[in-house]
């Protein structure tokens, strides 16, 4: 019991990848992964700071964990991830139930902090590193079909609204050879898909190799796997990368390319370092080089000083690009960032209205794109039984859309099959095998 660890993960895929790293570190020291919080004596929350509501979720979770600690005063409660890095000792001072606070670059010391906590001492490890990539650590992964690998850590872009450069520190890339070896070993274990992760994968750099080289090496090393990647920054997406995506059958024709806003004035205030003209050119170029490429994006509504005209410009870009999908957020001021010094002057009702307009438009576009796929062929990876019925399987297309197909003895979970789409909603495709 004393060695049983339960981890809850919040935030982006990089945090989910980090949880696997943390479990790799703890397992090598004899800790066990508990499936259920009641079986654990060490409870860790791997947290996110990206918007205020992400942090509020953790505070209410901590309130709930007070009860756990009351029943079991010996339990160790720890905060990992971006909130640990951002709030540091404040977390321990304000939340009495927290025993340890460990930021993203200090996970190697976690066993040490757990020992301290068992000795009744509170531990804080929040130093950021310029070199830590956890390259030698084998992440603990359950068997499955899809895996993710962080190929770099940190971010140097300093978009003015964003906490990530402060919570994750400077950009650094992992050794290319060790990434390729990890991809190969995943293929041997039966994984069918891997997603290469970084805040801005396009600035990956290891010895003389760039991200296009890394993608090509992974695609060659594991020809039976689908290779995905995220996130691409519009400033650094090279022709070489586009050509590499086009060249390899098993690299998905799908690019997550956050635009954030359609207004050049706002983009400049955000320090995004590109103009809308540059962005739209990039989209055109990608469509020429990679037939059938699809895009998704992130959009922020209500950045300081955003006018209705700026907002209309965002809607305009969405209509021009016609994204397959979008993650859409209300601006949330983050202490310590440059934008925090600007007044958060767009009223919440206006932010909500603009966000809803953005969501409605995206839904309409997704619906139209999906309708246009009816009658077309797609290759899907069957991932699981459908949530709604055991008579159906749920799979994913190359462009990451969910596709439901009837269950049938001639194929199984983990197979790639060709289907023809016969029906679609804005979120789901339905197909028949061919
Ligand atoms: N590195 C990635 C992802 C960063 S976080 C990228 O650059 O795209 C994911 C998204 O959260 C961002 O793209 C942005 O749209 C959103 N985001 C970041 N900080 C935010 C803030 N303070 N308020 C609202 N949304 C924010
Ligand atoms: Fe944040 Fe910008 Fe870095 Fe993305 S690129 S993590 S939005 S600072
Ligand atoms: Fe959140 Fe940190 Fe990821 S702030 S979005 S968990 S990098």
Image (cartoon, helix red, strand yellow):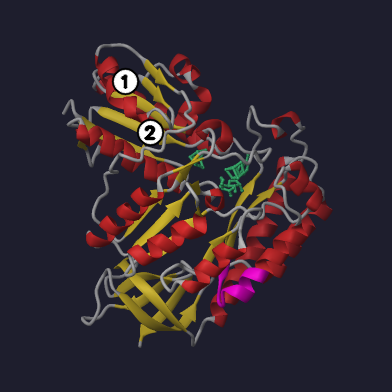
Q: Is residue 292 magenta?
A: yes
Q: Which is closer to the viewer, label 2 or label 1?
A: 1
396, 405: nearer the viewer: 396
Q: Above or below — where is 124 with respect to 265?
A: above
1, 270: nearer the viewer: 270
184, 8: nearer the viewer: 184
The residue labelled by disc 2 is: 45
- For the residue carrying disc 1, how many other residues have a C-alpha within 10 Å: few (<14), some (14-19), or many (20+)? many
Decide if residue 294 is on the left or right side of residue 60: right
Q: For residue 8, what is the image quadrant?
A: top left
The magenta region covers: 285-295
Decide if residue 373 is on the left or right side of residue 379: right
Q: Position of residue 94 (x, y in %)?
A: 48, 17
Q: Is residue 425 visible?
A: yes
Q: Is residue 163 magenta?
A: no
Please tell me how many numbered marks the rendered image carries.
Answer: 2
The residue labelled by disc 1 is: 113
Q: In which quadrant will I find the N terminus?
A: top left
35, 70: nearer the viewer: 35
Q: Is mark 1 within 8 Å of ligand 3?
A: no
Looking at marks 2 and 1 on the same chain, the residue that comes earlier in the sequence is marked by 2
Write the residue at 62% across / 54% down: 236
Decide if residue 69 is on the left or right side of residue 27: right
Q: Position of residue 374 (x, y in %)?
A: 51, 84
């Amino acid at each position: 019991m004393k060695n049983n660890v339960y981890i809850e993960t919040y935030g982006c895929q990089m945090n989910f990848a980090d949880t696997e790293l943390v479990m790799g570190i703890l397992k090598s020291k004899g800790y066990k992964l508990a499936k259920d919080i009641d079986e654990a004596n060490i409870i860790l929350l791997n947290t996110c700071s990206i918007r205020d509501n992400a942090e509020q979720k953790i505070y209410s979770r901590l309130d709930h964990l007070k009860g756990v600690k009351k029943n079991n005063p010996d339990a160790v409660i720890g905060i990992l991830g971006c909130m640990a890095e951002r709030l540091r000792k404040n977390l321990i001072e304000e939340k009495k139930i927290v025993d340890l606070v460990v930021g993203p670059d200090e996970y190697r010391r976690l066993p040490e902090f757990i020992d301290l906590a068992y000795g009744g001492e509170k531990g804080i490890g929040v130093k950021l590193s310029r070199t830590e990539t956890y390259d030698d650590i084998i992440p603990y992964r359950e068997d499955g079909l899809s895996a993710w690998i962080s190929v770099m850590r940190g971010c140097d872009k300093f978009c003015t609204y964003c906490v990530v450069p402060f919570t994750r520190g400077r950009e650094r890339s992992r050794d290319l050879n060790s990434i390729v070896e990890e991809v190969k070993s995943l293929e041997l274990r039966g994984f069918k898909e891997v997603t290469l992760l970084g805040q801005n994968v396009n600035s990956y750099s290891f010895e003389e190799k760039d991200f296009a080289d890394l993608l090509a090496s992974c695609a060659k090393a594991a020809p039976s796997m689908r290779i995905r990647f995220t996130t691409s920054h519009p400033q650094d997406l090279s022709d070489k990368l586009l050509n590499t995506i086009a060249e390899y059958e098993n690299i998905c024709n799908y690019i997550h390319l956050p635009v954030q806003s359609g207004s050049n004035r706002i983009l400049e205030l955000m320090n995004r370092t590109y103009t809308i003209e540059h962005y739209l050119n990039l989209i055109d170029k990608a469509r020429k080089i990679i037939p059938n490429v699809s895009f998704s994006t992130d959009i922020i509504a209500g950045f300081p000083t955003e006018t209705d005209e700026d907002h209309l410009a965002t809607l305009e870009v969405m209509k021009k690009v016609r994204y397959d999908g979008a993650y859409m957020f209300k601006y949330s001021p983050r202490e310590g960032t440059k934008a925090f010094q600007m007044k958060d002057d767009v009223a919440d009702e206006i932010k909500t209205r603009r966000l809803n307009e953005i969501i409605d438009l995206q839904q309409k576009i997704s619906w139209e794109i999906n309708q246009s796929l009816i009658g077309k062929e797609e290759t899907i990876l069957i991932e699981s039984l459908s949530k709604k019925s055991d008579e159906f399987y749920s799979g994913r297309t190359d462009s990451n859309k969910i596709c439901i197909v009837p269950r049938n003895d001639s194929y199984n979970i983990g197979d790639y099959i060709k289907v023809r789409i016969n029906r679609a909603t804005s979120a789901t495709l339905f197909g028949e095998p061919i």
